[in-house]
Image: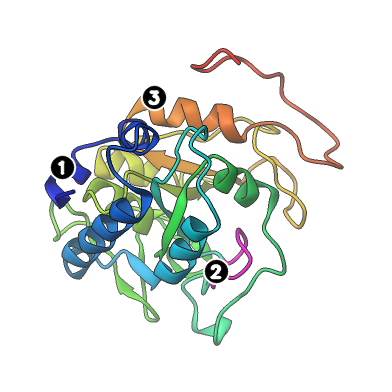
Amino acid sequence: MKVSEYSALDATALAELVRKKEVSPLEVLDTAIEAIRQVNPAVNGVVDETFEYAKAQIDAGIDYEAPFCGVPFVVKDQGDLLKGIRGTVGSRIAGKGIYPKCDSELGRRFKKAGVIVTATAACPEFCWNNATETILNGITRNPWDTELTPGGSSGGTAALVAAGAVPIGHGSDGGGSIRMPASACGLVGLKPTRFRIPTGPEGGDPGQAVEFMMSRSVRDTAIMLDAVEGPDAGSYGAALRPPYLTGK
């Protein structure tokens, strides 16, 4: 698979090729690695490459029924989503990094949806800015115009998705941190309503700050919302489930 072919597909179309075995998950990952290495010098959206983690996911087996089977994915550099994935929160205070003790419920659902985690994506220090630039990780740039910011705080994810390095990626939003970079980079950026997305086992109140994702197509966002929404064990509230796209 050529990078140009890979970057032209949204996550749904790419997963369909994997499902039909027209391309292997490892071939997709190899192409994603090439794409990341092509675009990242210009946008500086990657904090850590997690290619060995991604290969281990593939070696563990692919669920070809998953909606995003074999689709490369990046996670925001928060250190709260997946065991084994380091986070710095864009701060030197984090030292060697933050390592979650376990997968969060949302992280588990992302992986169950089939995504392959290829990198962590830059954010401003403590995710507290609408431009993604830090002393620790440098300045992240907008792929449409590298003199401009991709926004924040999920700016690294937005830059990498818009540049074609990955078709979808994780973000979080308290005061616009998914919506602003999605707008700046021409992406679909949805902040789900309160109680829609799980926050356990160590997350806070499912109110102001919400974790979800960004994509290049409405259908990718709708399908992922179907895949990951709903309360986790111990949640004191839940939002009624509408059929976003699949009707299931």
Say which mark, if any, is on residue 5: 1
Outermost residue on the bottom side: it is 95
Quadrant assignment, res 19: top left
Q: Give, as a single range, the part of the protein colored magenta.
A: 79-86
Q: Nearer the viewer, mark 2 or mark 1?
A: 1
Q: Tell how many labels.
A: 3
- Whether tag 2 and tag 1 are in contact, CB under 8 A, the answer is no
Residue at horizontal 59 percent and vertical 43 percent from the top: 112
Say which mark, if any, is on residue 43: none
Q: What is the secondary structure assignment of the residue under circle 1? A: helix
Which residue in the structure is indicated by mark 3?
Answer: 219
Which amino acid does the dot numbered 2 rest on?
Ile
Tell me which numbered mark, 2 or 1, is placed earlier along the sequence.
Answer: 1
Tell me which numbered mark, 3 or 2, is placed earlier along the sequence.
Answer: 2
Say left or right for 7 vs 63.
Answer: left
Q: Nearer the viewer, mark 3 or mark 1?
A: 1
Would you say the magenta stretch is mainly helix, strand or loop? loop
Which amino acid does the dot numbered 1 rest on?
Glu
Is 214 or 184 nearer to us in this picture? 214
Q: Is residue 82 magenta?
A: yes
Q: Position of residue 127 (x, y in %)?
A: 50, 61
Reply above or below: 29 against 236.
below
Q: What is the secondary structure assignment of the residue under circle 2? A: loop
Which residue in the structure is indicated by mark 2?
Answer: 85
Residue at horizontal 64 percent and vertical 43 percent from the top: 208
- Whether tag 3 and tag 1 are in contact, CB under 8 A, the answer is no
